[in-house]
Image (cartoon, rainbow, N blue to C red):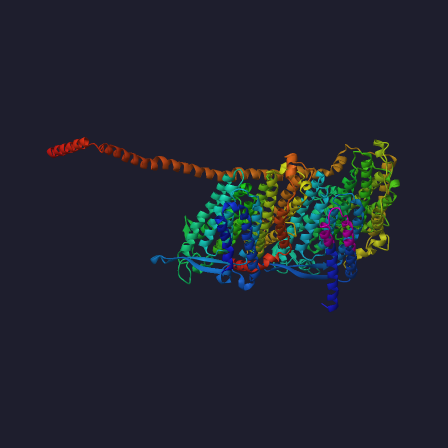
Amino acid sequence: MIPDQAHTAHIQTFHTVVAVVLPLLAAVINNFIPNKVKITGWISTIAILLSAAFAISVFAAVWNTTTVHTQQLWFTIGATKVYAGVWLNNLSVMMLALVPVIALPVHIYSMAYMREDERFNRYFTYLSFFCFSMLALVVVDSTVLLYAFWELVGFSSYLLIGFWFTRDKAVQANKKAFIMNRIGDIGLLSAIIILFAQYGTFDLVQLFGDGGLVSRSVIENGLWVAPAGQLPAIWQYVAFWGIFLGMAAKSAQFPLHTWLPDAMEGPTSVSALIHAATMVAAGVFLLGRAYPLFTPEELSVFAVIGCFTAFMAASIALTQNDLKRILAYSTISQLGFMVLAMGVGAYASSLFHLATHAFFKCLLFLVAGIVIHEMQHVKHENHLDIDPQNILYMGGLRKKLPLTFIAAVVGSLALIGLLFTSGYLSKDGILIQAFEWAEGKAWYFQLVPAGALLTSLLTAFYVSRLIVKVFFGKFRLLDVHPGIKLHISDGGWNYKLPLVLLALCSLFPLFSLHPWLYEHAWLYQGFLPSNHLERMNIYHTLIPIGVNIFCVMVVYLAYAMYVKRNYVAHQNSRLFKLSYNQWYIDAFYNKVIVNSVLALSRLLYWFDRTVIDGLVNLLRNIVGELSSLAQWTDRYIVNGIIYLITVLVRRIGNLARLFQGGKVQYYLYSMLAVVLLVFIFKLLI
Amino acid sequence: MNLLTILIFIPIVFGAIILLLPSSLRASFKYITLLATLIQFALSIWIYLDFKTGAGFGGVNHEDQFQFVQKLPWIHLDLGAMGAMQIDYFVGIDGISLPLLVMTTLVMVIATIASWEITSNLKGFFALFLLLDMAVIGVFCALDFFLFYLFYELMLLPLYFLIGMWGGVRREYAAIKFFLYTLFGSVFMLLVMVGLYLSVTDPVTGNHTFNIVQMMNPANYSEGSIFSVAAQQTILGMPARLVGFVVLFIAFAIKVPVVPLHTWLPVAHVEAPTPVSIILAGVLLKIGGYGIIRICLGIFPEVAADGAFWLGLLGVVSILYGALNALAQRDLKRMIAYSSVSHMGFVLLGIASQTAEGISGAVLQMISHGFLSSMLFYLVGVVYNRVHDRDIYNFRGLGSIMPRYTAFVMIAFFASLGLPGFSAFVAEAFTLAGTFKSSTTNGLLPYWMAIGGSVGILLSAAYFLWTLQRMFFGQPLLKGGEVWRTALHDINFRETATLVPLAIMALVLGIFPSLVLDVANGSVLALVEFLKK
């Protein structure tokens, strides 16, 4: 390496490490601050601010210019050396910058949002710890560390979902989130182990870097042949499915998506940061890292699953009434788009959508947080027994919360993907490439772009429904409880500043100077291979125009249905039930999988007590019986004989004693008798 | 004076002091014991720092590579025509015994502090405790099979009384069960030991020997002897070496414990007082793993290779069976006992793989489990001492009532379920990596075993988190009502001081696994090299 380059690498590594460690430092400090001193909010915020500054400087230095890979020996196990280090390329520096930039407004917002909570300090400890794990996850250079931080983000998410640990629903949700993520984790772990067995290294750069080991291996004749060594081909598929599971759990893809809606039990600010913008994108990030591993067939799996998840989640979002749940399903749906994009080879678009989605979804959650906060305020002030998250009680809030309303509209437009927003740039790219991908393939592959297109329209509908129900019409709670007082407002600067920042970032100028050609977005271009073709067919024109026109029509339809006509869905139709009950997936898991595992565990415990321990006890009893038998023999036979002998001896002794009376007459008689006897014997013989 | 010898016999000296002191000084016994264990701990740290690593210090089957060796003739009888009987006092350590030794001395300190709860017959308790302490240290150091066996049997006696006299309601049942189980294992071990003695001759003196290291060299077996590799003798129609291996394996598998020889463990744990539970889980189980590595693999390497599949299978079965059973428990201590079965399954699986990663992972898992299970049992003891109940369903929302306690419970639970950053993660991950690799490097274990083992990681999350949710979260609700509520005060200084070192060890070993791996590596590589032959 040229000295100058080495120097740059050194500096960027150092800055990266600082950016990663600052939040950890904040978490450690916060942990020791007593509960009464509410300084932790500022400590965490300043840490993330500095972290963002360092991250952006690293981003500026590395993006499109260089890659940095530095490492240090961590430990040696057997002959294998395990290194710890950072790998900075376009993918990781984008994530490195994105995470603190999104986290910063969330921190500011949280200071106000959590102010009343008695575990305020704990909250910021957890939040900073999450930021640390997430930042480390995106920059590390080895699969072991990747897995470690992959789990740690899951762990911080567990802590934050169950932050209000006295609520049963919250602690059930965090348990569920962690266990479902664990399913993904063991998939990822298996994949890592398989890659290690195949390539003998944990180094991400050696594995997935340009011209790395993975890209130099092939599957032929049922063998997966690497530059050194080979495995049966099936293990390549297992590794793929492992990574798939890991991705599906973290990024809430079917069939492991059901934890995310439940995760909404955590504080809304947490939902905004972790369960919308950053952590859930880690699955897509993982696909980005491991991209060279996947064969075309495996990529199709991503396309299909992504498309299905996007559609299913959007269809569920249509009928939900919980504000945060709608947004959660919308997140699942959008993550489906990203996975779909990875599957159809739209690598750049997928990551681009990841970035834009982070901003507008975070914005929408913060909006939801304000709305819920104000509804809670109404609830407490008037002593009502209502669910503050239920959109059926809301309505007409645009007048009370004007800034929130504007922010919500910007976020929604971006989510729908209408012109002039960032969402337009990123999502239309995905749709276009999905069509290109399906071209010339079998008919069922056409379902993928068609499904994506349909999902776009569904998205437009449920988002509009949400906005209309919350902000338009009249405040429906007044229908139920006339005469309640409403003292609600947008809130202080802690609320307003994040909304404004994120709203601005949800518009096109941050990503592209050209409002309608996504190919010009700099973020998109950063992930493209240099030889790609631009605007080669009609899709590039047709789809954006068509989608926009249709979406506008759908938005108007929703507006007309809910504001003008006060439409109420047929709640008994099958489709409604399917959507409202979230396709019964959760119910199925609970009934079939959870219950059968528990039944199995009880069966095994029964087996343990009755059969295994039963055998042991049987053995013990047999030994016990044998020993009683031995005891009986001992007492009545062995001992009996001895006893008999003693009795005999005693009897004889007693008899003999009779002759020893101590009287001289008796002795004389005896002597006489003996003499007589001797004479008689003599005579006889 | 040899450091190891001092380390082994310190407890006996202090035990004798306790026995000689009048009972009126009984309040001082725990401090005397604490002093003994602390000195031991300091000595073990000294040994750790003084320990040399590298290629020339592998140990395993090279007698000259063992460190801190002391070898004294002990029982030498001239038997005339039958040669001379040769039993040595032979102690020494290599990279596999050293980490276990350090872990043991620390766990002993913790167990001593946990003994503060003991109130009856203190003299007996602490004297037996110190005797046990001596025996376990001796087991890890002994390199003469006779000496090993002596220490091994010597552990049994104090444990029987410690459970039987200071235990819970069904303590006698538990003690007898424990005693019979382990006795069953060791009686047959005695026979194999004698067989080995008669087969092996010391190349220097020409006498039969109990030297374990010399038993590892096939050249030392006299021609035609029962366990000679070349002679292929049979016992009851089965190959003699197979029988020898199986018998020794069963003896150690009972200790580990391996399913289906595990049922003494839940009973013993549930009835044992907290300090004994800590020693049982923290140290005793490791003697099983250590014995399998040192004796079964060392003396019968070719049988171990042939039977690797079955060992691996038992490992996977233990992992899954233990985990599923843990899921079904209502008694917190029983749940943790079954989780021990599951976690020790990883040790067996790693050993069976006979790869460097697998065996290192197994050693690290033993160390990690030593600290974590001690912590878990101590934590159960905390709640049990306060209200004399351990049923998971009788508690709810302990997080609000005992926040600091709950924090430690969360640390222990998450560390045990393999959260990265804690020692169990590195250990389990590399055990599985070694298991998977085994198929490509030595062809002993099939690929699927690694995947099967990883399901155990998932199940461990399930039972620990479910317990957290049921016992510690939610609105407080106790079976004992207000009485319990006042009894359940948060942990005090002494309890915190006990838990903190364990938590720190788990964390430090998770972040710097090299602390164990660096000393173990040389020996593990030597062992793997030895097993390949």
Q: Quadrant of residue A666?
A: top left
Q: Position of residue A233 (x, y in %)?
A: 63, 53
Residue B304 in view here: no
Q: Which SS type dominates the magenta stretch?
A: helix
Q: Farthest residue in the left direction?
A: A683
Residue found at the far bottom of this picture:
A3
Q: Residue at x 55, y 52 (%)?
A: B35
Is residue A44 shown in magenta?
A: yes
Q: Quadrant of the N terminus of chain A?
A: bottom right
Instruction: Tell me the quarter of the image containing the C terminus of chain A.
Output: top left
Q: Position of residue A176 (x, y in %)?
A: 68, 42
For the residue pair A650 and B297, the one nearer the viewer reads as A650
Q: Where A378 falls versus A428 (above or below)?
A: above
**Residue A191 in magenta?**
no
Q: Is residue B204 visible?
A: yes
Q: Which corner quadrant of the image does residue B358 belong to?
A: bottom right
Left or right for A364, reference B293: right
Residue B19, position in %: x, y?
A: 48, 48
Is residue A170 found left or right of B203 in the rendered image?
right
Q: Which residues are magenta?
A: A23-49
Q: Count the marks.
A: 0
Examine the image and state in which quarter residue A479 appears: top right
Front-most of A49 and B228?
A49
Q: Residue at x 59, y 50 (%)?
A: B371
Q: Nearer the viewer, residue A337 or B284?
A: B284
User: Is A173 situated above or below A283?
Assistant: above
Q: Is residue B149 left or right of residue A159?
A: left
Residue A143, image x, y percentages: 67, 55
